[in-house]
Image (cartoon, helix red, strand yellow):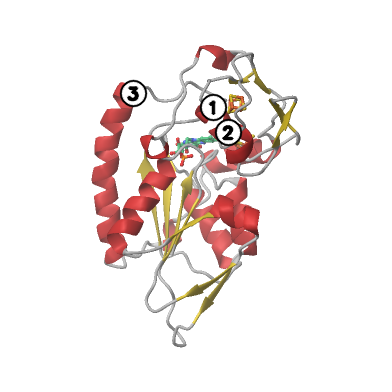
């Protein structure tokens, strides 16, 4: 079983390739959170995977909240542990995300066997302009190559040297900014909004509500996945002024 979270499709792209090759089911963390589905039964020699984007060199808040409530029922013989892997999609690097994932999983008595970094296009439009189409094509070639290696490693039950996992300097400095940041204050819809409701439907943490046919952000913080702003069909959602001029990003798997 592969638990995945995605804002703009990269992690779904990776999860689907891994699931298809290894015959593992995909479970959407957004849907599971909305349905409060936290109990899963592991069958036979099924593996457990977590595929999600790196945020501020750490784990997205929604993924951390999900793992904190997750219960995996297993029928494994005493002493046998399940194979648990993470595939962390990112624009530049994953920093100390594997250590953070390991610590979250430990609390659920799930030992992290291996974590893999997968570089893909950058989507963080609230901070910088997302990767453009030409670079996206180049990145996709290396992403697919790396995915093939990752799938081979998982199929051979490859293990990491867990002692090398560390909360890196980048994670220690950047992640608290995410925890205390991820503000919705600067989001608004401009006059191109036609009231289609897509942003309200896709927000993984349901902080968008339609009022007078326009979206309103009803909580101070969200998980900052960038789905609303990147995937609005009218490019009507902005974050302050700078995004008025910036391109949007959406992995073609979502189109
Ligand atoms: C809030 C936020 C923070 C991000 N932080 C990082 C980061 O620390 N390092 C990095 O390499 N990419 C970072 N990114 C880029 C994403 O991890 C990357 O584009 C990812 O593949 C997006 O996955 P998705 O399409 O499944 O949502 C960040 C993106 C967002 C929205
Ligand atoms: S997705 Fe865009 S066009 Fe549709 S309601 Fe939201 S802001 Fe308006
Ligand atoms: S408000 Fe937008 S950026 Fe925040 S979680 Fe919802 S869809 Fe993602």
Q: CA distance from mark 2 to mark 1?
A: 7 Å
Which of label 1 and label 3 is nearer to you?
1
Q: Which residue was labeled with disc 2?
A: 198
Residue assigned mark 1: 232
Asked where in the image residue 45 lies, by quadrant, the reply is bottom left
Label 3 beta carbon less than 8 Å to ligand 1: no
- The structure residue drawn at horizontal position 57% and vertical position 50%, both measured from the top left corner, is 30
Quadrant of the rendering where the N terminus is positioned: bottom left
On screen, residue 160 versus residue 228, left or right, reads: left
Q: Position of residue 219 (x, y in %)?
A: 75, 36
* Mark 2 Cβ and ligand 2 under 8 Å apart: yes
Q: Is residue 39 visible?
A: yes
Front in this rendered view, residue 163 or 134 = 134
Dot label at residue 9: none
Q: Is residue 33 left or right of residue 235?
A: right
Q: Is residue 107 above or below residue 233?
A: below
Quarter of the C terminus within the rendering:
top left
Q: Do the residues under discs 2 and 1 have CB atoms within 8 angstroms?
A: yes
Mark 2 / mark 1, whichever is N-terminal:
2
> Mark 1 CB in 8 Å range of ligand 2?
yes
Structural distance between the alpha carbons of marks 1 and 3: 18 Å
Instruction: State the SS at label 2.
Output: helix
User: Closest to the observer: 187 or 128?
Assistant: 187
Residue carrying label 3? 133
Query: Quick one: 167 or 90, which is closer to the camera?
Result: 90
Residue at 57%, 45% (x, y): give it: 60
* Place of residue 116 in the rendered image (x, y in percent of width and height, measured from the top left): 37, 52
> Dot 3 lies on which element?
helix
């Amino acid at each position: 079983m592969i638990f995945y979270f995605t804002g703009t499709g990269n992690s779904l792209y990776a999860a689907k390739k891994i699931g298809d090759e290894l015959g593992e089911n995909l479970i959407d963390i957004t849907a599971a959170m909305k349905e409060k589905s936290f109990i899963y039964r592991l069958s036979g020699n099924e593996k457990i995977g977590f595929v999600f984007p790196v945020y501020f060199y750490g784990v997205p808040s929604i993924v951390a909240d999900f793992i904190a409530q997750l219960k995996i029922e297993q029928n494994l013989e005493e002493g046998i542990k399940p194979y648990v892997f993470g595939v962390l999609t990112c624009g530049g690097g994953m920093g100390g995300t594997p250590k953070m994932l390991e610590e979250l999983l430990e609390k659920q008595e799930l030992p992290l066997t291996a974590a893999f970094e997968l570089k893909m296009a950058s989507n963080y439009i609230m901070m910088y302009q997302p990767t453009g189409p030409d670079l996206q094509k180049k990145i996709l070639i290396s992403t697919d190559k790396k995915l093939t290696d990752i799938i081979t490693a998982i199929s051979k039950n490859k293990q990491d040297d867990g002692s090398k996992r560390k909360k890196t300097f980048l994670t220690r400095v950047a992640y608290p900014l995410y925890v205390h940041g991820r503000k919705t204050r600067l989001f608004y819809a401009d006059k191109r909004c036609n009231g289609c409701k897509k942003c309200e439907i896709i927000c993984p943490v349901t902080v968008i509500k339609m009022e007078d046919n326009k979206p309103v952000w009803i909580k101070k913080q969200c998980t900052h996945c960038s789905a609303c702003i990147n995937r609005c069909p009218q490019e009507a959602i902005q974050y302050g002024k700078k995004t008025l001029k910036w391109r949007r990003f959406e992995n073609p798997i979502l189109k």
